Image (spheres, rainbow, N blue to C red):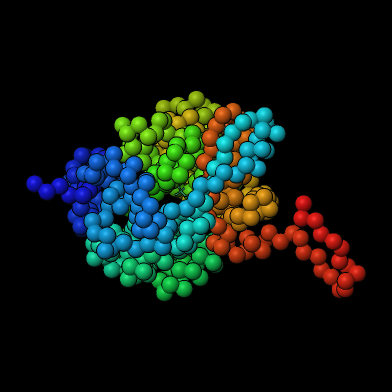
Amino acid sequence: MTHKKFYLHCTKCGYDVPDFKEWFQHMQKCPKCGCTIVDVKYTADLKSIKNLMQDESKEANSVWRYFDFLPLNDKANIISRGEGSIPLEQWAFLEKYAFEKYKLSIKVHAYRNDLNQGTGTFKDVAAAVAASVLKENGVKEYCVPSTGNIANAFAHYMAEAGISLSVFIPSDALMANEAEVNSYGQRIYRVNGDYAMAKKIAAEYSAKYGILMSGGNTDPMRVEAKKTMVFEWLRQIGEVPNVYVQALSGGTGPIAIEKAYKELAGLGLVDKMPRFIMVQASGCAPMTHGWVKAKKEGFPEGWLTSYPIYDNPKTSVPTLATGKPGTYPIIAKLVKDTNGEIIEFNEAYLVDIARLIAFETTVRIGPAAAIAVGGFFESLHAGHIKNGDKVLLNIGEGVRRAPDFVEEMIYTTKHIDSIDDCTRFDRN
Ligand SMILES: Cc1ncc(COP(=O)(O)O)c(C=O)c1O
Ligand SMILES: [Zn+2]
C-alpha cells in the first residue's frame, strides 16, 4: 500500500481527510462532523528534519526547505520568493538595557520578517504555502478577509500562482495595503465597517459563489507554513528561546508554534513551549482585557469564553484590529499553559519605538512590529521577563508596509535658509 505524504486529521471526530481535494470539496469542513480545525499529519519520518536543517543547497533557501513537512505533493507547484529563510539577529543593545536598568542577564534575538522578499511581513510564508497548495489543487478563485498584511501577501503570491483573489478589508485598513493589492490586479472590497464585518461579508461571498475563503488563524495552510519558524530557530541558533514575544491580532503565530512542538515532540530537539508574551495595541486589546480580568478573578470556570468584543475599534495599527477575537479560547489557553501573558502597549509610543530601533540597529520596523518591541519593554517593566531568559522578539513587518508611519518618524529635519543656519552634526 502506498502511503500518502500527508493527510488532514479532524481534531473533533478523528476522521482522516485524505487530501486537500476532499477538504476543499467540503468547503474546508470535516466531511463527517463539520469541524473546521484539522491537524496535518505527515508520513515522513520526522527524524529527517535534522538533515533538512543541514541542507546547504540554494533550493533550501525558503520555507520550502521543509517541503517534506509542508502539505504539498509536487515541487513543481511551489510558489516562492525566498520567504521564511530570514535571519535571527542578536540585539545586544536590548540585552544591555535589561541588565543596566533591571539587573537581568538575558539574551534577545529578533526574528527579521521584514526581510521576507514577498511583502516584508511574516504573512509571506503563509501566502507562499497557501498559493502553492491552491495551485496544486486547481483552485482558480479565492477570497480572504484581512486587516491588511495577509491581504498584501496573498495578493502577491496568488497573482504568481495565477489565482484571482478577492480581498475584504475593513474601512480603516491602510491605503498602502489597498494600493498594494490593487497593484497586483487583485480585487479589493473595502467594507463599510470593521474587520468582523469584513469577515462576515467575505463568508457570504464565499457561500454565494462557492469560492473558497481562507480559514483564518486555524487554516491548516497558514498554520503549517508558520510552524516552520520554530524549525528555523532551531536551525539557526540550535535551540528554541524560552520566551516568545509577538504582536497579537488573531493568534496564528502561537497556534503554529504549538503545532511545531507537537511535531518535534519525542525528537529531543525541544523541551517545553516558550512562554507566550502576546502584545495587543492599546486601541484594540480585547484579548488583553479578557485575560487581565480572568487573572484578577483567579481564572474562574468559563473564563476562556469570557472576553469583550469591540465594534469598530479605534486604533492606529489597523493591521492588528481584531475587535472580535473568536480565537481567544485557543490563545488564552496556550498563554496560560505556558505561563505567559497577554498585555497591551500604548500606541502613543510606537513612533518612538520605531525611531529607537532604527537608530540602534538601522532596522526599520512597521507599527505592528513596534507593538511587539514595545511589549518587550513593558514586559521588562512588569517583571514578565526573568533573569536568564532567552527572548525571541518577532519583528513581524518592516516599515515598507506603512509609508505614513515612516513620515511620522521624521525628527532630525531643520528648515534652513542659508549656511548660517547649519551647525555640525553628531548622530549620538
Ligand atoms: C506584522 C504583524 N505582526 C503580528 C500580527 C498578528 O498575527 P497573529 O495574531 O495572527 O499571530 C500580524 C497580523 O496581521 C502582523 O501583520
Ligand atoms: Zn470530524
Q: Residue furthest right?
A: 420
Along the viewing direction, whichever of 71 and 63 lies nearer the viewer:
63
Q: Can I make out residue 103 in this image?
A: yes
- Residue in the image at 54% along x and 28% along y: 296
Q: Residue furthest left?
A: 1
Along the viewing direction, whichever of 356 and 16 lies nearer the viewer:
356
Q: Position of residue 103 (x, y in %)?
A: 67, 29
Q: Residue furthest top?
A: 298
- Residue in the image at 19% along x and 55% along y: 22
Q: Position of residue 318 (x, y in %)?
A: 54, 56
Up-down relation of residue 182 to residue 172 (above or below): below
- Residue in the image at 50% along x and 53% along y: 113
Q: How many marks?
A: 0
Horizontally, residue 294 falls left or right of residue 326, namely right
Q: Position of residue 278 (x, y in %)?
A: 51, 41
Along the viewing direction, whichever of 121 and 63 lies nearer the viewer:
63
Q: Position of residue 253 (x, y in %)?
A: 43, 46
Q: Quadrant of residue 256?
A: top left
Q: Can I make out residue 254 in this image?
A: no
Q: Quadrant of residue 20?
A: bottom left
- Residue in the image at 48% along x and 29% along y: 339
